[in-house]
Image: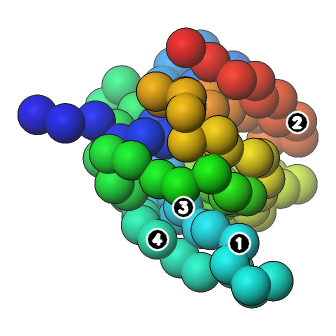
């Protein structure tokens, strides 16, 4: 099975658990406009491994996480109904893993491995 060039992992830091069922979109910036390339939903481990193609060209990309629906589903209020992470991708790099650490009133991210 091939893995997407970009993957993500969402952890709910308030609950100390993977964030299951978070809708994620992958967009590419093309000619000054965002174009949706793929979408996925995090699995039981909070991972989205099938988010787009195995290889992407160099460029600017964005992951958008539907955190409002996730928090509503677990009965929690949130200040951030969506988290949007924009980053540049170098096609020469084999893989990009972009984790999201999430709570109702804060989030952080980093370039994972």
Residue at the image point whose x is 70% and y is 23% from the top: 111
Instruction: Give the answer, above or below, for where 60 lies relative to 107.
Output: below
Quadrant containing the C terminus is: top right
Q: Secondary structure at mark 3?
A: strand
Left or right position of 106 against 7: right
Residue denoted by label 3 = 26
Front in this rendered view, residue 82 or 85: 85
Foreground disc of the pair 1, 3: 1
Q: Secondary structure at mark 4?
A: strand
Please state the horizontal and vertical placement of residue 23, each as a whole percent of the image. Answer: 48, 59
Circle 2 or circle 3, nearest the eye: 3
The residue indicated by pointer 4 is 37
Residue plotted at (43% across, 40% down): 5
Q: Which residue in the protein does label 1 denote?
A: 29
Q: CA distance from mark 4 to mark 1?
A: 10 Å
Q: Residue 32 appears at what percent x and percent y?
A: 81, 83
Residue 72 visible in the snapshot: no
**Where does label 2 land, which residue?**
106
Q: Earlier in the sequence, mark 3 or mark 4?
A: 3
Q: Which numbered disc covers residue 108?
A: none
Instruction: Say few, some or many: other residues with alpha carbon within 10 Å of mark 1 (under 14 / 14 to 19 / 20 or more).
Output: some
Q: Earlier in the sequence, mark 2 or mark 4?
A: 4
Residue 16 position within the rendered picture, expressed as x and y whole percent measured from the top left: 59, 14
Marks 2 and 4, how far apart in space? 27 Å
Query: What residue is rendered at 34% in x and 54% in y?
Result: 53
Q: Are marks 4 and 1 in contact (CB under 8 Å)?
A: no
Looking at the image, do the residues carrying marks 3 and 4 touch, with CB atoms under 8 Å apart? Answer: yes
Locate residue 63 relative to residue 42 in the image: left or right. right
Q: Does dot 2 land on a helix, a strand or a loop?
A: strand
What separation in Å lies between label 1 and label 3 (alpha carbons)? 10 Å
Distance from label 3 to label 4 (Cα)? Answer: 6 Å
Which residue is most to the left? 1
């Amino acid at each position: 099975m091939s893995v997407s060039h970009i993957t993500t992992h969402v952890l709910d830091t308030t609950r100390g658990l993977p964030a299951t069922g978070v809708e994620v979109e992958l967009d590419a910036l093309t000619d000054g406009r965002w174009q949706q390339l793929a979408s996925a939903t995090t699995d039981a481990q909070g991972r989205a491994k099938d988010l787009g193609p195995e290889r992407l060209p160099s460029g600017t990309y964005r992951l958008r996480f539907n955190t409002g629906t996730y928090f509503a589903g677990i009965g929690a209020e949130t200040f951030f109904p969506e988290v949007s992470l924009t980053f540049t991708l170098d096609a020469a790099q084999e893989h990009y893993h972009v984790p999201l650490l999430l709570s109702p009133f804060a989030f952080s991210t980093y370039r994972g491995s």
